[in-house]
Amino acid sequence: MFKLIEESGIGLPVTIKVDERGFFLYWMDQKKDCEVIDMSTIRDTRTGKYARVPKDAKLRSVVCMGSQEPLGDKTITVVVATDFVNVSFINFCCNKKQTAQVWTDGLLKLALNLVQLNWSPIEFLHKTHTKLNLLVDKNGKVPIKNIIKTFAQNKDDRKKVEKALTSCGLPSSKNDVVSPAKFIFEDFFTFYTHLTTRPEVVQLFDDICCSVRGASDKKKHMTVDEFVDFLNRTQRDPRLNEILHPYANSDRAKDLIREFEPDKQSAAIGLLSFDGFLKYLMSADNPIVSSSTFELNNDMDQPLSHYFINSSHNTYLTGHQLTGKSSVEIYRQCLLSGCRCVELDLWNGKTNEPVILHGYTFVPEVSAREVIEAIAESAFKSSDYPVILSFENHCNTKQQAKIAQYCHDYFGDMLLYEPLDSHKLEPGISLPPPSMLKNKIIIKNKKKHHHHHHHKKPTASVVLEPTTAATMVLGNGDLPRGPIRQSSKDSNQDDDEDDDDSSSDTDVEEDDIDRTVDLKHVLQGKPLVDKVSNAKETEAGTEISVLVNYCQSVQFTSFENAEKKNRHYEMSSFDEKQAMTLLKERPMEFVKYNKNQLSRVYPAGTRFDSSNFMPQVFWNAGCQLVALNYQTMDVAMQLNLGIFEYNMRSGYLLKPEFMRRADRTFDPFAESTVDGIIAGTLTVDVISGQLLTDKRVGTYVDIEMYGLPADTVRKKFRTRTVPYNGINPVYGDEPFVFKKVVLPQLASLRLAVFEESGKLIGHRVIPVVGLCPGYRHVVLRNEMGQPLPCGTLFLKITVKDYVPDGLSDFAEALANPIKFQSDLDKRTKQLAVFADELDQSVDEVSMINE
């Protein structure tokens, strides 16, 4: 097989392999030099038409070996990425099409397997050990300098690594080597225990061993009875049903001892050493999150409106909203990550070929045809659940017809041409479930309706503020630009008038739109009078309209009008400011609306830097399509990636029952217990960290919770900073208590480790309902959600049902007999916990105007 190096025009003969555990793809050239790629960084594999074959004729002639099949069919393109924007391609050429296909399919299956993201801490140690054994020298020996470099940069930390190597009988000089036969995993694990020392686990082990017999002296082994007591008293969730989830018994304890105790003689008589106990604590038998959380464990037979759906905003952008770049590749990357709704801003191209771009900015365009082709190729590689294409359509009818034709040509049977017989487009009929729409692409666009126009003046239900460039030209979606103020008068528009709002009968071809703009005017927020009429979306042409069924874009008028029409297949888009107004003024109605109809919420146009609002705010209202800027790995995007990893990264998460049932009401600003839901108390004790960074820096841990405003806790819980220690810091703080979690089903815990400078080292997002209590290790992730090589935190988690403190509640009632605060003001204060992200766009406009 050849590795294709396009830059130098070389086809390098190599042998490619995958290690037996599936951790790495690696290849060796004829000089025995080895290169390694972490499987978790592989985002895609391609062969055939979508492989990247060399353009250089000389290189093509070098690698055209074997069968006479097309070169693309014999090429394997491995796509590697550290985020959604920075993507690289590694190309191999083999002698048969069949060989290329086997490698392409096999690598993709390994790369997309969620297990490799959620291995236990001890499995990640196996991964590090495997990499060290792959990167051997020409004599097949492991260089000690590689071991030292893996764990330390600083001189003092390198001495720690060398000391640990010496302590377990391994060579320790940077010029030394060790044979892989003398560096098996047991040797590496011994080195790990000497490097991290784990004094906090030693103390726990001693406490358990002394607790049953009341002995004061330290013992070398834990008995079966002591281990059973630990499993039931400390590691078991007290809320579990005893019949469905029986208590651990001596047989279970003996099985675990046999599995983890390295001394087989001790294991045979039911004794567990410290090393065996530590292995258990770091094993898959002691996870921080229940393994079922990662499986497809949601009911996928509910209407589409009953799910949170992983969604992207301005998908084509790779950077700044005004001056950044566009990309076809980012559509693939978003879909491969599990995103199920991507956005296409469609405009007239200068050569009668439709393009995708950010209108009235300096962002370059990309071909609409190429984007549609990329979506067709990538849509269902990582999830077979439906993909929604959110069209913002500014094209004339000729170019709309081309878009429709491209959808036919590239999507074929994947395109949902017509509604299902079981779910007709009729009032009161619910949307179909994801399970009935597998491998289907749904078009979201305006629908062309044929009826007589009624020109009577409608009763206003939405009042709009004057349009400016910031609110209209840079906006996106189906609503008129500008903050909404809900009228006190109910809407009484008839159905035909509402249809007029969503589309027109006319089929008049529009002239090509001039998309140039004075950027200075945009930044100053000045109205672009000559552009306003062109900024809105054009009417749906016939060819596009016939493709639209379950996602018919309409202008939102009022909750009352939506309920009156009762058309579940109609949906509206809101920018974050408009959605926030509805959330604060009509929260319970917003939740009710989202039980039947889809709503899409997207970042305000004034977020020029492509930052994101906190999606939790609108998930709390049941909004399904909360669209984010995928190119920005901020906390909001980290939360989104973390949450949608669950349910097998299908892109769909079932909303809690009370947000779905017609006979239940829900207030997203609830502070007291939600009807039928037991509030919880969560205690997190951050005990220590292991191998957090190879730098000699101080570290600390932030603990946050995201959920209802009453449950959200940010910038409150932080450990002390442990100076100059990224290897084995012990924090030793008092436990952090989330005393009352009103709605655990909507809450997520975020643990984030920082350098003392404030730079993020790693984090993890975990759903509260999936947390396992007891002493647990959590493997950290980088901003993109990829696991750190070895970085873990050691925690003690305690969960229990919330019990009100009657005396404190009574005292508070006496101190505050009268509350003068209005509900609206109170909700504004509640939302202040999300203020950093929600207020950013407003702050930016103020700074620009200054």
Image (cartoon, grey):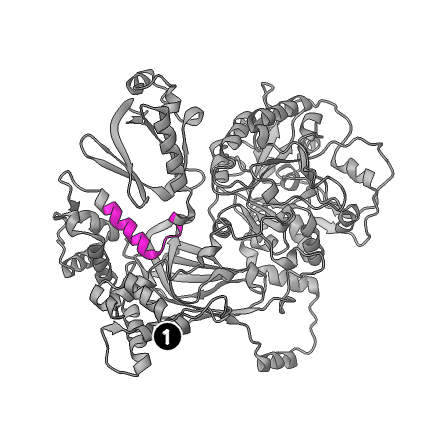
- Please say if 257 is above or below 635: below
Q: Is residue 829 magenta?
A: no
- From the top left corner, tell me how far across and down residue 141 is, in percent: 15, 44
- Residue closer to the observer: 253 or 465: 253
Residue at position x 70%, y 66% from top?
A: 822
- From the top left corner, tell me how far across and down residue 46 is, in percent: 41, 30
**The disc labelled 1 sits on which kind of residue?**
Asp
Circle 1: element type: helix
- Please say if 37 is above or below 100: below
The residue stretch that appears in magenta: 116-132
- Report if residue 760 is visible in the image: no
Residue at position x 30%, y 83% from top?
A: 214
Which residue extends farthest right? 456
Other-residue count near label 1 (Cα within 10 Å), few / some / many at <14 / 14–19 / ≥20: many
Relative to 219, is 564 on the left or the right? right
Number of labels in the image equals 1
- Report if residue 583 is visible in the image: yes
Residue at position x 31%, y 67% from top?
A: 254
- Residue closer to the observer: 160 or 181: 181
| Quadrant position of the N terminus in the picture | top left
Relative to 3, is 363 on the left or the right? right
Residue at position x 50%, y 52% from top?
A: 643
Q: Which residue is mark 1?
A: 229
- Please say if 146 is above or below 534: below
- From the top left corner, tell me how far across and down residue 203 is, in percent: 29, 73
